[in-house]
Image: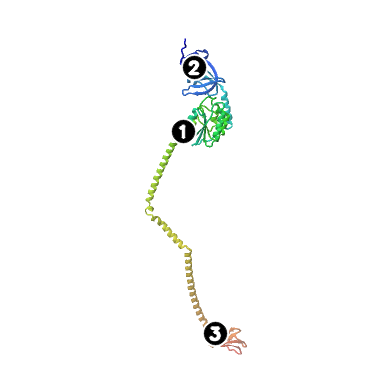
Amino acid sequence: MEKKPLSVTALTKYIKYKFDQDVHLKDILLEGEISNFKRNVRGHFYFTLKDDRASISAIMFKSNAQRVRFNPKDGMNILVRGYVSVFEAAGNYQVYISSMEEVGLGNLYQAYLQLKDKLEKEGYFSREHKQPLPRFPGQIAVLTSATGAAVRDIIHIINRRYPLVKIVVYPTTVQGENAKHEIVENIEKAGMNKENDVIILGRGGGSIEDLWAFNEEMVAKAIYDCPVPIISAVGHETDFTIADFVADERAPTPSGAAEIAVPDKRVLLDDLHRTQKRFGDSLERKIRELRREVSNLTERYVIKDPSRLLEPKARLLDNLTHRLQTNSPKKRLDDAYDKLERQTDHLFRTYRRLLEIKSTSHTRLTDRLRVVNPRLIVEQGYTLTKKDGRIIKSVKDTALGDVLEMEFKDGNLKVEVLDKKEKNNNG
């Protein structure tokens, strides 16, 4: 008898029935490490529970998840209680968790924390070392997988926001053992290209294992030493890698990195239009002010009658000219000459008057002297008698035997007193 084929739905329902009927799968305790943890908008937990050799999908609905006392993260070791069943729509089995307890940290997460602590102490995360992003980059280097969704998102968003920038993609393996070496090599290449203004280093989301290349120390050092500012955009918003802490800027997603790297042309155009309007308004205000000033000026008398503007200047010029003429050396010299002539004339007149006075006085004195001059008597025929050079005025001044000198008009005689006869006063 020929077998009838089963539908996928029938097979999946049968497998699910087997899972649901297995008593060992109805209530299990399971220990493992969280990987690729997500919390959806409705509050459900989705993650992978794994150990060294295997992994299983896990889900914890909101009704149970809200009783968890800690914040589940990739790398945590947890102990869960639940049951295993099949998710028919996807055809895979998974564990449905009713409770969760934290056991400890997984090996990868422990290594992540140790490296983070080491690099932080060495100053790799310091704000002082981080470079500012250029406001208007000319060229952006994108280091990511050439075929992933991340590179398409980055290119699309940059071209939409700021089409003036040039994008250079450095195809880079971002997952696997060789990824760290390729990431370091391309960071160094992009850093040596002086045309690159910004580097975007990123990839899409994944588990802690998928993102581990960005937790390698050699990658952190390459980012730290790069002369071009780097934006780290690894995984989703809740994913944090060492590269995020070392980079000059961290973006929550590759799309977010594209938005951080370039300005939005719409915002720039809005700013330009506002600036243009502001300048236009300012120019109109200035024109109105200038028109008012021109109107005020045209009403002033100096505009209507410019000659009035010159009147004060003309008066000032006349005053200055007069002062200059008054105080000029020639004028002062002429005044000095005039003064000298006046003083000379006054001196001559004074001299003549004084001479006339002296001449008159001299004539008067001469006349008086002539009247009393003994010589005049001699000239009239009288004589002068002298004794020892003195004029004898009285007989009493002589004695017998005296030798007297008699002066005549035409000569002198010496006589001896032989006799003398005095007259009495009575007669």
Residue extending furthest toward the front: 2
Q: Which residue is mark 3?
A: 375
Residue 180 in percent (x, y) is at 56, 28
Callout 3 amino acid = Arg
Secondary structure found at label 2: strand
Which one is in front, 387 or 113? 113
Spatial CA span between label 2 and label 3: 187 Å
Residue extending furthest toward the top: 1
Cβ–Cβ below 8 Å for labels 3 and 1? Answer: no
Q: Quadrant of residue 174?
A: top right
Give neighbour class at mark 1: few <14, some 14-19, many 20+ (Cα, 10 Å): some
Residue extending furthest toward the bottom: 418
Task: Name above or below for residue 242 compared with residue 103.
Answer: below
Callout 2 amino acid = Val
Cβ–Cβ below 8 Å for labels 2 and 3? Answer: no
Give neighbour class at mark 2: few <14, some 14-19, many 20+ (Cα, 10 Å): many
Spatial CA span between label 3 and label 1: 150 Å
Task: Name above or below for residue 301 compared with residue 203.
Answer: below
Secondary structure found at label 1: helix
Residue 370 in percent (x, y) is at 52, 82
Quadrant location of the C terminus in the rendered image: bottom right
Q: Which residue is mark 2?
A: 86
Residue 97 in percent (x, y) is at 51, 18
Left or right side of 332 for 293: left
